[in-house]
Structures are given as structure tokens and as C-alpha cells.
Image (spheres, helix red, strand yellow):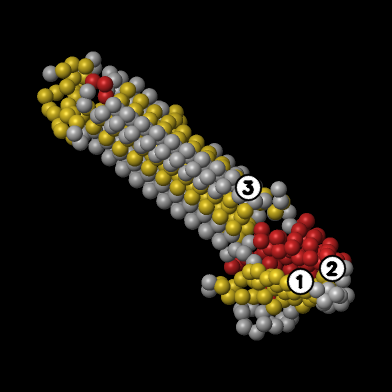
């Protein structure tokens, strides 16, 4: 029998992964505990309970406890009132500490990862925290992973979500579903990132914004002020606030409608359609008749077409193709076309058209009305 301050080794031993472990028992109560390899593994103020195992250079101390079938090994440390339950594994150089920390189920903490907090910090289900990742209060659960140099503070990552690289998620933000936040991205202040969304590069998402669907936000983009970026939208650069940005069919239609109604109300431009109204053009399904499926933006005075918006079927949904095909007085032709995928892209197409019109004296006077639209569209402010 070997006595160690507040506990003793019983005569029970266990060979486990090449280590000879000893069952411990509290001296004060006679309560049986779990298994440790040496006195070094368990401080007098810590406890190893149930069938938990601590070995190698791992250490439990300062009122921390491990329970159930937990394993703590290598050079890992659990301390400062942290509690670990279930079938959790903490290993390598990982560190778990803080009065508010609860690790449970099949979670794994390894590498040089740190999980800590004095309020509420939980890691559970099949979550993994590894690399040099840090979780400071908040929660990670499900099959979520936080790794590399990622930092979570008072935020929540769950489902199959991943946060990695040098990304930071904090201030009550949530990342869930199959979403990913990585590189140097910053996500904070009650934000929701979910679905198959991705936020990466140097992007920032904050102030109650939502990114979801298959949307991607990257580059130096900033999304904030309750903005929603969704569908298949791609946002690279720029600032987005207080609106919905998407290339989902319904929202994509709304983006185009907003543009058309604004242009139709301008001074030098008007619209033409084979239908009785703009509303009918947008409400009617594709007919495969080019005339019916195309709305024209033209000059009020000459009726000369400047931009065509054609309804097209892509991936089982209706989208809109932006077409510019103009010829100046010298016979020079300027032409491009692109399916509109987002508000960002539409604004770029309009800007490209403005620049082309300004280069042609015949059309330069119509550029102002398109520029007015870009000014009016305050949801997008370029850096």
C-alpha cells in the first residue's frame, strides 16, 4: 500500500497502453477512485474517479476532476476546478482548466490546444479541439472541430462546423451546420454562420449578420448590421450592411427587380418588354422565346438598347443574364454578358457598363442614371 497525502494506492493494478496503472482510494472516505500511473499524475487537491485513467506525464491538480472512462495522458494537464466526464481523451500537450469548464461524451482535446474559462465552457459529443487552438468560454459540440491557431471566446461551434487557420469567433457568435470559418477571418457579435457557408481570408462578419446556404465571404469583405448573405452568393471585398444578399432564385429576382424599377424611374433611361408590365415579365415563367424572355433598358430619347436582361434556366432555377452590346458612331463594338449571381456582381457589371458608356460620346449622357443606381444601392460600399 502506498500513501500519497489525501489518497492511497490500492493493491489493484492495470496494464494499459504499456503503462502500469494503480487504482486510488481517498483516505478520508475510503472511496475508490480511478487509475493513475504515478504520484505525479494526481495532486492532493484533484481527483480521478470511476474508471478514469491518467498516465504518462499527465497531471490532474488544483481541484480538477476526471470521471467515467476519461483518459488523460502524455503531457496533458487538467486543473483549476475543470471537470471531465464520459469517454473524453485529453492528450499530447493539451491543457484544460477553469471553474466553468465541462468536457464530456467522446470529445477529444489534443496537440497544444487549450480549453479554459471561469463562466461556462463546454466541449461535448464528438467535438475535437487540437493543434494550437484555444477555446475560452462558450461551447463546441456535435462533430465540430476547432484547430490550427483558431480562437473561440464566448461563442458556439456545433454540428459539423469547422473553425481553423488563424480564425477567431467570439462575442456570442455561432458557427454550425457544415459551415467553415478559417484563414484570418473574424466572426463576432451575435453572428450566425451556418448551412454550407464559408468565411475566410481576411473577411469580417459581425453585428448580428447571418451567412448561410452555400454563401462565401472572403477577401477583405465586411458583412454587418443584420445583413444576410445566403444562397450561392460569393462576396469578395466590400462592405455589406442591413440587407439580404443572395443568388437564391427569389432573392436574385428581387435584386434584379430593384435595379429595373430604379432605372425605369430614371430621367434618361426606360425599359421595354413584350409583356404588359415589368411585374408580368418577372412573374411569368421562361418561354424560350428570346423576345418574351428579355427585358431591354434603353435610352428614352432614341429607344436604342443599352442593356438587356434575359431570363435563363440554370441548375433548375431561373436566373438573369446581363447583356451589353453597343456600337458607337465609329462602328466600334463593346459587348459582354454574364449571369447575375449576386448584388456584388450586378454592381460590378453596372460599373463596367458605366465606364464603357463614358468612352462613347454617343452614350455618355446615359451613364449618369446608372451611376445614380450605384449611389442609391447603399447596401454595398466599396473599400
Residue matched to label 3: 220
Task: Name the disc covering residue 113, or none.
Answer: none
Residue at (13, 29) in percent of width and height: 13
The secondary element bearing badge 2 is classed as loop
Quarter residue 303 falls in? bottom right
Residue at x 85% of width, y 75% of height: 330
| 342 lies above or below 299 | above
Where is residue 116 shown, x and y percent of the image? 42, 31
Q: Quick check: marks 2 and 3 in contact, CB under 8 Å?
A: no
CB contact under 8 Å: marks 2 and 1: yes
Q: Is residue 250 visible?
A: yes
Q: Which residue is mark 2?
A: 360
Residue 358 x, y percent position in the rendering: 83, 64
Give whichever of discs 2 and 3 has the lower sequence position: 3
| Snapshot quadrant of residue 64 | top left
Residue 285, placed above or below residue 355 = below
Amino acid at each position: 500500500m502506498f500513501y500519497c497525502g489525501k489518497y492511497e494506492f490500492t493493491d489493484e493494478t492495470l496494464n494499459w497502453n504499456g503503462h502500469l496503472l494503480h487504482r486510488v482510494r481517498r483516505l478520508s472516505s475510503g472511496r475508490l477512485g480511478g487509475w493513475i500511473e504515478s504520484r505525479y499524475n494526481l495532486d492532493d487537491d484533484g481527483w480521478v474517479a470511476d474508471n478514469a485513467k491518467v498516465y504518462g506525464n499527465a497531471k490532474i491538480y488544483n481541484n480538477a476532476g476526471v470521471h467515467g472512462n476519461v483518459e488523460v495522458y502524455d503531457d496533458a494537464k487538467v486543473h483549476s476546478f475543470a471537470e471531465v466526464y464520459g469517454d473524453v481523451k485529453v492528450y499530447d500537450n493539451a491543457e484544460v482548466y477553469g471553474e466553468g469548464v465541462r468536457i464530456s461524451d467522446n470529445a477529444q482535446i489534443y496537440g497544444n490546444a487549450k480549453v479554459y474559462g471561469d463562466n461556462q465552457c463546454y466541449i461535448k459529443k464528438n467535438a475535437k479541439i487540437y493543434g494550437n487552438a484555444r477555446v475560452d468560454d462558450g461551447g463546441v459540440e456535435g462533430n465540430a472541430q476547432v484547430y490550427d491557431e483558431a480562437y473561440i471566446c464566448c461563442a458556439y461551434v456545433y454540428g459539423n462546423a469547422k473553425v481553423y487557420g488563424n480564425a477567431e469567433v467570439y462575442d456570442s457568435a455561432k458557427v454550425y451546420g457544415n459551415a467553415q470559418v478559417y484563414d484570418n477571418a473574424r466572426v463576432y457579435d451575435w453572428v450566425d454562420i451556418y448551412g454550407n457557408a464559408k468565411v475566410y481570408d481576411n473577411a469580417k462578419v459581425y453585428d448580428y449578420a447571418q451567412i448561410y446556404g452555400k454563401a462565401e465571404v472572403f477577401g477583405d469583405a465586411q458583412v454587418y448590421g443584420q445583413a444576410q448573405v445566403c444562397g450561392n452568393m460569393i462576396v469578395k471585398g466590400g462592405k455589406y450592411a442591413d440587407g439580404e444578399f443572395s443568388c437564391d432564385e427569389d432573392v436574385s429576382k428581387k435584386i434584379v427587380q430593384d435595379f429595373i424599377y430604379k432605372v425605369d424611374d430614371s430621367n434618361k433611361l426606360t425599359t421595354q418588354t413584350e409583356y404588359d408590365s415589368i411585374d408580368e415579365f418577372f412573374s411569368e415563367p421562361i418561354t424560350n422565346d428570346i423576345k418574351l424572355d428579355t427585358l431591354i433598358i434603353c435610352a428614352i430619347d432614341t429607344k436604342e438598347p443599352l442593356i438587356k436582361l434575359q431570363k435563363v434556366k440554370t441548375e433548375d432555377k431561373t436566373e438573369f443574364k446581363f447583356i451589353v452590346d453597343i456600337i458607337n458612331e465609329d462602328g466600334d463594338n463593346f459587348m459582354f454578358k454574364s449571369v447575375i449571381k449576386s448584388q456584388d456582381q450586378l454592381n460590378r457589371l453596372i460599373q463596367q457598363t458605366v465606364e464603357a458608356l463614358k468612352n462613347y460620346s454617343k452614350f455618355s449622357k446615359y451613364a449618369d442614371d446608372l451611376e445614380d443606381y450605384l449611389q442609391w444601392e447603399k447596401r454595398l460600399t466599396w473599400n
